[in-house]
């Protein structure tokens, strides 16, 4: 018996050869992909070049799609000044066919996110962003693209860590009850089950190939919610496009049955462009592209227009610094792992403004260092792109101790919840297992066992667990429980939120300047490990 599909492929190949066209144009499906753009449209490869490459690729091989794996519309002033609208306009111009929300797509609030989802031409897709009461997906859980010989299902997956890393109140009602969730639990079981159900549903609908487009990551991500952990509990997945941890790789990872699956991630801010190819026989292979052709003129013109608006709004000088303040050391995002001079400076600004006993700033709030020389509001907003509101609260010494314990619970690994401090010093032992216990949402639930943190001094005196202290910081940590800091919920509010974090820094620079005390990149010795 003649295999009809094989016969048609042979016939089509003969036609293509007679026309001088490449054989792969008949049946290959090409998935170009980005992740963690973080508004860096003019960085590295640039989005205008990505758009041009997509057009060239699609001309050669019509079965080509352009995908994004989350965290595109936040990260620089371009996003913050318009709640992501400018980024959506640029993504639409670049011709994206599919996108999922990362954790930072929600940073402008739920109403804003849902508005951006309507404005984005391809919309957002995520199977595990659900209504908590029903478990139903808020967005389409997957999309099936029908090609000549193949139906390809793209399944969206958003990290359950979104509830902790974005602002928790955005997912709650006015009484603090969660309306939305991401299939989160301590074991990861809810996520695994939801994604498997979605994969099976797509297969039942006729998908020949299933690709996960996820914002999960590996290094620095919560272990049960990494892409490798998810894949190891699934079957029926042919490829996985990932994001979140800002890494560059293409690797083969096993599924539940041991089948090796291609997994790829492109770094951040368009460091590379991913290219996952589904061959005619269903084989999936991935790779990273490091060089692209000349930019698409229309997209480049739109980027320049949007960036010009940003420059006009933020070009006013606020001060200057004789030293560079760093967020990274030796290629690592040190501000998420250890004290840095940038963390010292920012925390000092908060404590000085409120005349507080101490100040806490989470390492994940920093998105760049501050250069030596003149600073403008754009400089500061590039470092602090979230525009979190500043707040002052009265907290007990015990709550502070618990916060410091949570801060170093993942050390020495990267952790957006690692706290930079002012007004206090402490020592911790990274060799001890962390005694911190978390609830199903990843929030602080208590301490069981020997603490890592010791020798806490505040104002030059040992911290008293029974005493009350004035602590400054952002509403993200001190009010909303971001990064799991729920120990501060319902603490007395001393100063209402008003100024943003950028306002606080601008005020501090104008009044205090930047002294030589911040000269050492590793900071002033406020946070030390045992033996140092």
Image (tube, rainbow, N blue to C red):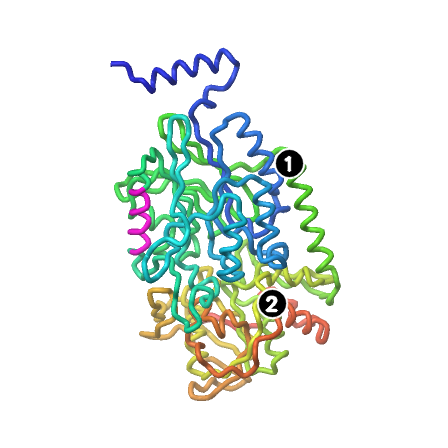
Apparent side of residue 28 relative to residue 305 in the rendered image (left or right) = left
Count of picture labels? 2
Instruction: State the image coordinates of residue 351 (x, y, percent, origin top left).
Output: 59, 78
Query: 101 or 270, which lies in front?
Result: 101
2 vs 1, front mark: 1
Quarter occupied by residue 423: bottom right
Secondary structure character of the magenta stretch overall? helix
Give the crowd class for mark 2: few <14, some 14-19, many >=20 residues within 10 Å: many
Q: What residue is shown with label 1?
A: 296
Q: Which residues are magenta?
A: 190-201
**Residue found at the far top of this picture:** 18
Q: Which mark is residue 452?
A: none
The residue at the point 48 percent across, 61 percent down is 110
Q: What residue is shown with label 2?
A: 341
Query: 220 or 386, which lies in front?
Result: 386
Question: In what element is the residue under mark 1?
Answer: loop
Looking at the picture, does residue 356 appear above or below residue 528?
Answer: below
Looking at the picture, does residue 30 appear above or below residue 201?
Answer: above
**Residue found at the far bottom of this picture:** 467
Instruction: State the image coordinates of residue 508 (x, y, percent, origin top left).
Output: 68, 73
Would you say residue 78 is visible in this rendering? yes
Give the mark nearer the N terminus: 2 vs 1.
Answer: 1
Apparent side of residue 440 relative to residue 250 in the rendered image (left or right) = left
């Amino acid at each position: 018996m003649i295999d009809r599909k094989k016969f048609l492929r042979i016939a089509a190949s003969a036609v293509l050869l007679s026309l001088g066209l490449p054989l792969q144009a008949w049946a290959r499906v090409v998935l170009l992909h980005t992740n963690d753009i973080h508004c860096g449209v003019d960085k590295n490869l640039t989005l205008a070049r990505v758009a041009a490459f997509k057009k060239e690729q699609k001309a050669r091989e019509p079965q080509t799609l352009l995908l994004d794996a989350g965290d595109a519309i936040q990260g620089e002033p371009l996003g913050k000044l318009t709640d992501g609208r400018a980024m959506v306009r640029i993504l639409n111009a670049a011709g994206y066919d599919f996108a999922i929300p990362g954790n930072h797509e929600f940073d402008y609030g739920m109403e804003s996110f849902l508005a951006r989802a309507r404005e984005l031409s391809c919309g957002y897709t995520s199977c595990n962003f659900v209504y908590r009461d029903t478990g139903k997906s808020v967005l389409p859980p997957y999309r099936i693209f029908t090609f000549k010989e193949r139906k390809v299902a793209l399944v969206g997956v958003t990290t359950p860590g979104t509830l902790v890393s974005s602002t928790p109140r955005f997912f709650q009602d006015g009484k603090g009850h969660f309306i939305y969730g991401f299939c989160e639990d301590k074991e990861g079981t809810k996520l695994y089950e939801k994604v498997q159900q979605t994969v099976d549903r797509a297969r039942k609908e006729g998908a020949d190939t299933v690709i996960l487009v996820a914002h999960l990551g590996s290094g620095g991500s919560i272990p049960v919610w990494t892409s490798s952990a998810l894949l190891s509990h699934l079957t029926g997945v042919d490829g996985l496009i990932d994001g979140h941890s800002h890494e560059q790789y293409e690797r083969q990872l096993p599924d539940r049955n041991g089948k090796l699956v291609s997994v790829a991630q492109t770094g951040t801010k368009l460091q590379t462009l991913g290219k996952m190819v589904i061959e005619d026989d269903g084989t999936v292979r991935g790779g990273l592209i490091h060089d692209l052709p000349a930019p698409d003129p229309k997209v480049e013109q739109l980027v320049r227009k949007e960036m010009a608006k940003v420059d006009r709004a933020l070009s006013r000088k606020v001060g200057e610094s004789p030293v560079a303040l760093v967020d990274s050391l030796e290629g690592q995002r040190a501000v998420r792992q250890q004290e840095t001079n940038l963390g010292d400076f920012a925390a000092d600004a908060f404590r000085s403004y409120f005349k507080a006993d101490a100040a806490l700033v989470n390492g994940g709030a920093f998105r760049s260092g501050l250069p030596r020389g003149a600073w403008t509001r754009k400089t500061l907003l590039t470092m602090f792109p979230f525009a979190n509101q500043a707040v002052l609260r009265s907290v007990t010494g015990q709550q502070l101790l618990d916060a410091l314990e949570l801060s170093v619970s993942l050390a020495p690994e990267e952790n957006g919840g690692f706290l930079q401090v002012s007004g206090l010093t402490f020592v911790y032992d990274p060799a001890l297992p962390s005694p911190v216990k978390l609830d199903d949402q990843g929030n602080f639930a208590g301490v069981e066992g020997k603490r890592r943190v010791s020798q806490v001094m505040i104002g030059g005196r040992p911290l008293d667990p029974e005493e009350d202290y004035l602590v400054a910081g952002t509403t993200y940590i001190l009010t909303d429980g971001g990064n799991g800091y729920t120990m501060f919920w319902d603490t007395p509010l001393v100063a209402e939120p008003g100024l943003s974090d950028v306002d606080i820094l601008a005020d501090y620079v104008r009044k205090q300047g930047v002294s030589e005390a911040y000269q050492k990149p590793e900071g002033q010795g406020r946070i030390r490990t045992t033996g140092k």
